[in-house]
Amino acid sequence: MIGSRTEAIVGRVVLVIVLVVTLLPLLSMLSAALQPADRNPTGLVWPTDPQWQNFVTAFEAGHVWELMRSSLGIVLIVVPASLLIATMAGYALGNLRIPGNRFLLLLFVAGLTIPFESLIIPIYYHMKSLGLLNTPWAVGLTLIGLFMPFSVAWMRAHFVGVPIELSEAARVDGATVWQEFRRIQIPLAGPPLAALAILLFLWTWNQFILPVALIQDPLERTVAGALTFFQGQYYASIPLLNAGALIIITPAILVFLIFQRQFIKALLQGAVKG
Amino acid sequence: MIAPAIAAYGFFVLYPFALGIQYSFYDWNGVGASTWVGLDNYLRVFTDREMLSAIRNAFVLVIFFTLIPVSTGLVLATLIRNIRAGVFSTVSQTILFLPQIIPLAAAGIAWSWMYAQTGTVNQILSAIGLGGITRPWLADYGTALPAVGLIGSWVLTGLCTVLLLTGISKIDASLYEAVRLDGAGWFREFVTITIPGLRQQIAVLITITVIAALSSFDIIYTSTQGGPGRATLVPGLSIFRIGFTQSDVGLASAFGIVLMALVLIVVIPIQRLSKESK
């Protein structure tokens, strides 16, 4: 039998090992990024002469501003529209007793397990026939659809928990469904909406396969999709590739550090409900 | 009110799904005329050695995406169950979540450098006297697949640990005291209290991580491109290549449908099991 004291010590040691292993690849990227751009870097070292200008070079040569702008554009297509559409559907499925309720819910839940790769080929030809290939709309609109099962299930889970008396009281006061939705339900749905917004932002920002398949010019993709462009461009320079990749992941990490409590809560709940 | 959601889902997901089924019965190169071939494409998926090895690799990845993260998470969560909330636990949680925040494609890039001949993994191995086994891990036929799998373990272990830790904190502490008084060792405590108490979280994590393993794409695309040879080829990458590079739209669509079916076949029993046990 292990006493709780030994257990606690072993626990901390294992935890520290896991933490170090988690940070190691990121530190190793930094170490590579600071080594001379024209040489093959070596492992994890603090270089004697850190080459901070590698970041400047990668930032300019990588058109990072352009990249961030196109990513943000796609996020702005996906997030507000998804929130609005999913909230309405979640309210309808969770609160109103509409005919076919169960069937519709099942239809959405079935979509939760679809691997995006399974549909990537037909999605490509679908977008081609709509004339949307190589535009942010191809990625944005498709993502709204692909995220819809999760978004609807998420909002429905919230509305199921709202007491029905609230709607009844509003109805007695003569409010229509729409008035009740706008004046009572939406203001109450703040926290789940914020969490959903965080998740959708992150999933869009980090989306890879759709932008790679649907948008030819890497500069118009999401930042994650543009990483392939970095790989092509910095084929010969591991330091610059790592500097570029670090620049690309920094904004998401900054946003995460600022809103970390909300992020962690959203991701944990997202995992359970997804 | 539900109409816009159905429209978005129908037009951008269900319609492509139907298109995919339709394509899967044709031989089509994406531009010219198409010919009806019945179930030929499906037969090819199950007889072609390349596609079969992609499916096999995906199932091998389950060991690294599911087994390793969930068991590490379980052990770690059990050991640090009593950790007090404070700066250390907050910082730990933040670090454990970092791999969830960065794009998988970036994880692929970071790790290809870790695994390079002059990279950190070999540096550490040499430092602890294992210089003899150093190699470019992703370029070696024997080690490429496990090496790529460990990238998945790296991404998912933090999520598993934190989720299991929140689950374990909800288990009644008096249950633990009771078995301890009974003189039970840590193993019996683990089996009789921790595992049953976390059943739902474990089911959720297995579901998510198995889907992540079977449909892995980003990590492989930026680290090995399926190589060397087809040592790390996975269904997602294979579909992408067959569909876009070789322009065999029918075959790629059929493989897509097969992948979807595989995911369902694996996930539905897990869901069943977790519901029955409630």
Image (cartoon, grey):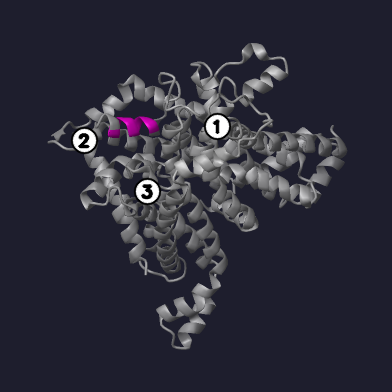
Q: Secondary structure at mark 3?
A: helix
Compared across the picture, whether A180 is left or right of B243 comes to: right
* Residues packed near mark 3 inside 10 Å, few (<14), some (14 to 19) or many (20 plus): many
Which picture quadrant has residue B54? top left
Residue bounds of the magenta highlight: B237-244
Of labels 2 and 1, the one closer to you: 1
Residue position marked by numbered label 1 in the rendering? A239
Question: Foreground: B245 or B28?
Answer: B245
- Taking the spot 28% from the left edge, 34% from the top edge, the residue there is B243
Subunit that carries the residue with mark 1: A
Camera sees residue B256: yes
Q: Is residue A10 one of those drawn in magenta?
A: no
Residue position marked by numbered label 2 in the rendering? B25
As shown in the figure, which amino acid type bears the numbered disc 3?
Answer: Glu
* Residues packed near mark 1 inside 10 Å, few (<14), some (14 to 19) or many (20 plus): many
Residue A17: % across, % down: 72, 33
Residue A93: % across, % down: 43, 65
Q: Is residue B240 one of those drawn in magenta?
A: yes
Which picture quadrant has residue A43? top right
Residue B199: % across, % down: 62, 44
Q: Which mark is residue A220?
A: 3
